[in-house]
Image (cartoon, rainbow, N blue to C red):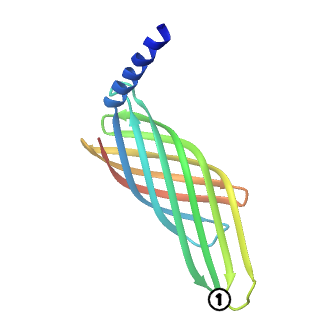
Amino acid sequence: MKKFLYLPALICTLILGIANANITVSGGTAHGNSKKIPINSNGFNIRHRYENSKYFPISWMNSFVYTKVSKFENKFYLKSQYYSIDTGLMYRLNSWSSIYGGMGLAYSKFQSRHVVVIGNKFIFKRLGLSVITGIQFNPVKNFVIDIGVEKGIMKSGVITNIIAGIGYNF
């Protein structure tokens, strides 16, 4: 009987905690490059921040980055795609700025195909670790500006993404 009474109390506590939380959603652009792959890619970034208390300075952050490029160069068709999912912590420095850092997974796919020679195709796919860091500004009450750097660490090299975005605080 006691277990049955604890469950509704736990559910009510969780619902009230979520209702009082500040949620920030931001989106923006991502620009990636690598020394191993000689083409620069562009894409987007979506970030979610969950801040439970105005008085506790640490909050939770999730980020998704996608970049892609495809082009012809010297009779070769080159295509590169990059995905990463990161999660980490944000620390509120003051009422208008926060720093964040986190880790996650990154996936990279690169294809190269000769346009004249049939069957001359090169593909490699890699899964690796990603690390993200940056700063978030709140210049006005419900508006945020994100600036950050994300690195995908693969066996074949490091892919660096510069991230900039804007968002809204609910």
Q: Is residue 157 above or below residue 100?
A: below
Residue for point 58% across, 43% down: 103
In the picture, measured across the screen, residue 108 lies left or right of residue 65, that is right
Q: Is residue 58 above or below residue 102?
A: above
Quadrant location of residue 48? top left
Instruction: Give the x, y percent position of residue 159.
Output: 61, 59
Residue for point 49% across, 58% down: 162
Q: Is residue 87 above or below residue 161?
A: above
Q: Amino acid at mark 1?
A: Lys
* Badge 1 density bin: few <14, some 14–19, many ≥20, Cα 10 Å: few
Instruction: Give the x, y percent position of residue 18.
Output: 36, 30
Q: How many marks?
A: 1
Residue at the extreme bottom of the image, as rendered = 116
Q: Which residue occupies the foreground of this view, 139 or 106?
A: 106
Q: Which residue is mark 1?
A: 75
Q: Disc 1 on helix, strand or loop? A: loop
Residue at the extreme right of the image, as rendered = 119
Q: Is residue 19 above or below residue 25?
A: above
Q: Which residue occupies the foreground of this view, 112 or 157?
A: 112
Quadrant assignment for the C terminus:
top left
